[in-house]
Image: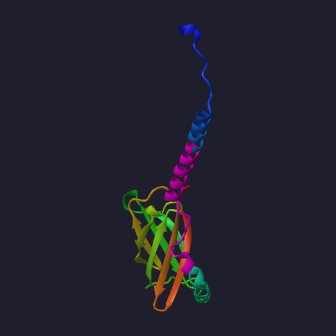
Amino acid sequence: MNAAQKRPVELKGWHVLAAMLAFFGLVIAVNVVFAVFAINSFPGEDVRRSYLQGIQYNDTLAQRRAQAALGWRADVRFVEGSGGDAALEVALFDREGHPIDGVVLNGALQWPTDARRDQAIEFRHVGSGRYVAALPSLTEGRWRLRARAERGAEALDFEAELSWPSSR
C-alpha cells in the first residue's frame, strides 16, 4: 500500500470519551482558577466575626443611640502633609459646634477591596479639636476610615469615604 492509498482514520468510542474528558477537565480547571483568584482577592466578609456582631446587634444599637444623644460629629479629610505626603485630618465638634479637645482618637484606613492594604492609624492632637495622622505611603484611590474618639465614658464611632489625592 503506498502513501496515496492510506486508510481513513476511524473515530472510535474512546476518541469521543477522551475529547469529552479533556473538554470538561479544562472547563473545571478554569473555574477552579477563577474561584481561587476571587476568594484571594476578596473573601466576601467586610468585618471579622460578623456572626458574633449579629448576635450583639442590640448592644450596638444602644451604643449608637448613646452616641447620637452625645451630639458629637467628625469632619474628615485628606490634607497634604510634609513633603507632599498624605495626612488625614479629623476635626471633632460637640452639639453646639465647639471643638472637642482631649480625646484619644484611633482608627483604621481601609482599602475597600483588599484588606492587605489596610493600615491602623493613630492621631496626634494639633489644637482646636483637630487631630492629624501622617500617611507617608498612601496609594492613590478611594479609602474608608473607621475610627473611634474616646474621652472618658464618652465615645464616637464614625466612618468616612475618602479619595486621595483629594482633587479628584
**Quadrant of res 44:** bottom right
Q: Position of residue 17 (x, y in %)?
A: 60, 38
* Magenta stretch, residue numbers: 25-52
The residue at the point 54 percent across, 51 percent down is 32
- In the picture, the quarter occupied by the C terminus is bottom right
Q: Main secondary structure of the magenta part?
A: helix
- In the picture, the quarter occupied by the N terminus is top right
The residue at the point 59 percent across, 83 percent down is 55
Instruction: Tell me: residue 31, above or below residue 128.
Output: above
Q: Nearer the viewer, residue 22 or 112?
A: 22
Q: Position of residue 117 (x, y in %)?
A: 44, 61
The residue at the point 53 percent across, 80 percent down is 157
Q: Nearer the viewer, residue 141 or 71?
A: 141
Q: Position of residue 114 (x, y in %)?
A: 49, 60
Q: Nearer the viewer, residue 116 or 21?
A: 21
Q: Is any part of residue 99 visible from this angle?
A: yes
Instruction: Tell me: residue 4, above or below residue 40.
Output: above
Instruction: Tell me: residue 108, above or below residue 105.
Output: above
Q: Is residue 24 magenta?
A: no
Q: Is residue 94 left or right of residue 126?
A: right
Farthest residue, direction bottom: 153
Q: Is any part of residue 165 visible from this angle?
A: no
Q: Is residue 37 magenta?
A: yes
